[in-house]
Amino acid sequence: GQNIDQPTEMTATEGAIVQINCTYQTSGFNGLFWYQQHAGEAPTFLSYNVLDGLEEKGRFSSFLSRSKGYSYLLLKELQMKDSASYLCAPSDSNYQLIWGAGTKLIIKP
Amino acid sequence: GAVVSQHPSWVICKSGTSVKIECRSLDFQATTMFWYRQFPKQSLMLMATSNEGSKATYEQGVEKDKFLINHASLTLSTLTVTSAHPEDSSFYICSAPRSEGHIYGYTFGSGTRLTVV
């Protein structure tokens, strides 16, 4: 079967760093996406990894290990506006995104 | 960048009525559109995949006669919730895949909050 495993909720302090882990199992693999979703809004694209390694984009970085079925999203210099749900979504052999429930990130002052 | 415009943003309707949700790709041609539903604190659930000029493909458990999907052109896909009931109240989101060279991604509409009373 196909499944995603992420922590349900995480709490971090403004200005700190947080790492959100994701393990996945899919039928085939065509890359992995990370999305941010604020309550009541549609997901917005953060990153895409198709090869192993780290992709850095400003305050956000994403890492992928295909052999381990593992990815993480690293958020630096946390801001209050980063409070949201973060969705790890691998793409299967049909280029269809597989969605988990996401990780709710709470930022405290 | 690629934009998908989704309307309405929110709608309240009475039980038994129908509601139409539109998704338009503004600056690219969307041959495929994914329709999702999301209940509070739950993951996005794929309802159906629409393809321009052909019948939509529905996921298991999704009633095709209740959730009518039309993809009449390369820039417009619609989802009609027929004979809506309170349990249909949810957040509906469309998403169109797109490719730019060897990179591909997904553009999401802004979502429609449906409340059936």
Image (cartoon, helix red, strand yellow):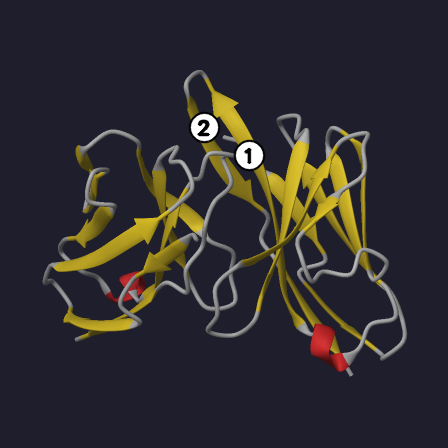
Q: Earlier in the sequence, mark 1 or mark 2?
A: 1
| Picture disc at residue B104 | 2
Residue at the extreme top:
B101
Label 1, secondary structure: give it: strand
Label 2, secondary structure: give it: strand
Point 22% across, 48% down: residue: A70
What is the total number of numbered labels drawn onto the structure image? Answer: 2
Q: Is residue B106 left or right of residue A82?
A: right
Residue at the extreme left:
A16
Q: Are marks 1 and 2 in contact (CB under 8 Å)?
A: yes
| Identity, as a three-letter code, of the amino acid under mark 1 | Pro
The C terminus of chain B is located in which quarter? bottom right
Chain designation of label 1: B
Q: Position of residue B113 (x, y in %)?
A: 65, 67
Point 45% across, 55% down: residue: A99
Q: Is residue A13 left or right of residue A92?
A: left
Chain designation of label 2: B
Number of other residues with Cα within 10 Å of mark 2, as a class: few under 14, some 14 to 19, many 20 or more:
few
Residue bearing mark 1: B97
Q: Position of residue A13 (x, y in %)?
A: 14, 71
Q: Position of residue A41 (x, y in %)?
A: 51, 61
- What's the CA distance linking mark 1 and mark 2? 7 Å
Point 42% across, 63% down: residue: A38
**Image quadrant assignment for residue A15:** bottom left
